[in-house]
Image (cartoon, grey):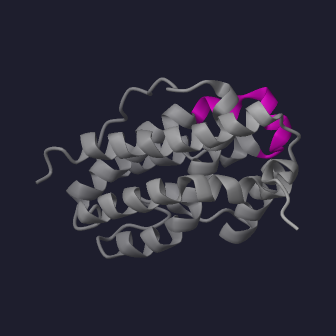
Amino acid sequence: MVTDTLERPDLRALRLREATHSAHEELDQSLMRRRPFLDRDRYGRFVEMQYRFFSAVEPFYRDATLGRLVPDLGARSRLEATARDLADLGLPVPEPMETPADLRGGIGWLYVAEGSTLGAAFLLKAVQKIGLDASFGARHMAPAPGGRGLHWRTFTEAINTAELSEEEDALAVEGAKAAFAHVRDLADTAFASAG
């Protein structure tokens, strides 16, 4: 028996993953081709890109409506940790970016931001080769106190159980797609002159 996935809110995270799979793969491949962990200069470009993304996502972490859906949402923001990483690298903190999206698509943007914590485990190992770690230069990649898996599960459980309309579900998917496209644009800009 086939059930419409819109009738199964527990599948929301799965729908977001499926809707953004190709964009996620393309972004990962694009970033790895740029070798962001080759040296501190290239890594600095990566951290600037991360800061710009996290500053664009920050209003979602502060939104009261989204905060009711994900109770620990405000504590999940990595903007401050990324600013400290830039300081460790001797780089200025860029001007915060405006959020390029309607707050109603925030679940999708948060899905992308929170999902990046899972991949950060691999990235953290890569930055250790250039003398950085979760206490210096790569704070924004540090695991949550309860671990990456639990951190991700509590987020996906929260969005899966959120009562959303069909329109809000569609906006979440569009938000996730827009977030991946935004990160891709930020990467293009950050590494444009890197060679």
Q: Is 190 one of the magenta-colored residues? A: no
Q: Is residue 92 shown to the viewer in this render?
A: yes
Q: Is residue 21 above or below residue 63?
A: below
In the displayed structure image, the side of residue 95 where residue 175 appears, left or right = right
Q: Is residue 73 above or below residue 126?
A: above
- The x, y position of residue 157, in whole percent, is 82, 57
In the displayed structure image, the side of residue 140 where residue 38 appears, left or right = left
Q: Quadrant of the C terminus?
A: bottom left
Q: Which residues are magenta?
A: 58-72
Front residue of 166/86: it is 166
Q: Is 69 one of the magenta-colored residues? A: yes
- The x, y position of residue 189, in whole percent, is 26, 39
What secondary structure is the stretch in magenta mostly built from? helix
Q: Residue at x 72, y 56 (%)?
A: 13
Front residue of 28/35: it is 28
Q: Residue at x 75, y 67 (%)?
A: 150
In the displayed structure image, the side of residue 145 where residue 19 appears, left or right = left
Q: Is residue 139 above or below residue 107?
A: below
Q: Is residue 171 above or below residue 88?
A: above
Q: Residue at x 13, y 45 (%)?
A: 193
Q: Quadrant of the N terminus?
A: bottom right
Front residue of 173/33: it is 173
